[in-house]
Image (cartoon, rainbow, N blue to C red):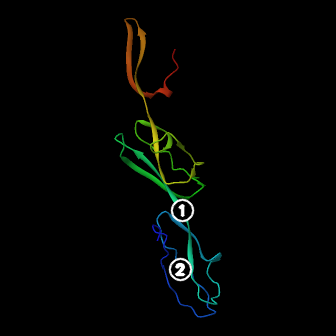
Amino acid sequence: DLETGELKVYQTDKYNKGEQLTLPSNPVLEGKEIVGWYDGETKYVGGETIESDLTLIAQLKDEYHVDFVIKKDDGTVQERLDQFFRTAGEKIGTMPQDPFVSGRTFVKWVKEGTTEEVTADTVVNESFVAEAVFEDVVVYELTVKYWYRGTSGEVVFETEILELEAHQLPYTR
């Protein structure tokens, strides 16, 4: 039992002396990964010859989850992109694709409630939520008039309205 530390019987099998051991399927235990079945210090992988009574105990290690989310302006989760499971000391490794939100530019991932950046090299030692950080995109509206100078002054023959982000604007002083 993960809460009390008390051992519980997961499965009981009967074998005749000389038969080969078949390991049970690993149980699903939230927040844990089974690294092997042991009798004392001896690890069993299946296929061993049974010579006497045997009690196998699953050796567990902590498994943490990292949720990548996009939040609405009110702080509620708009979208859960990915969930990764890692054991203590592992790097995240693979990051989700940069998210897209209309009118905003993705900047980085941070641990929820902090400014600590989350990258592929972040070492996981706890479960946490990584939230997307965005910047608003400023859009400028430009009116472009195409004209020529005629005998009676300027003649506009076409008007076009362009919407440009700041990095698309022509250089001006």
Q: Is 43 or 104 nearer to us in this picture?
A: 43
> Residue visible at 64% across and 84% down?
48
At label 1, which amino acid type do we have? Answer: Asp
> Residue 34 is drawn in which quadrant?
bottom right
Question: Mark 1: few, some, or many residues within 10 Å (few <14, many ≥20)?
Answer: some
> Residue 160 is drawn in which quadrant?
top left
Helix, strand or loop for disc 2:
loop
Residue 142 location in percent, x, y?
A: 41, 22
Q: Which mark is residue 62?
A: 1
Q: Is 88 or 7 nearer to us in this picture?
A: 7
Q: Is 52 or 4 nearer to us in this picture?
A: 4
> Residue visible at 47% across and 68% down?
2
> Residue visible at 62% across and 90% down?
52
**Residue corresponding to mark 2:** 24
Per the model, the C-alpha gap separating discs 2 and 1 is 20 Å
Q: Give whichever of discs 2 and 1 has the lower sequence position.
A: 2
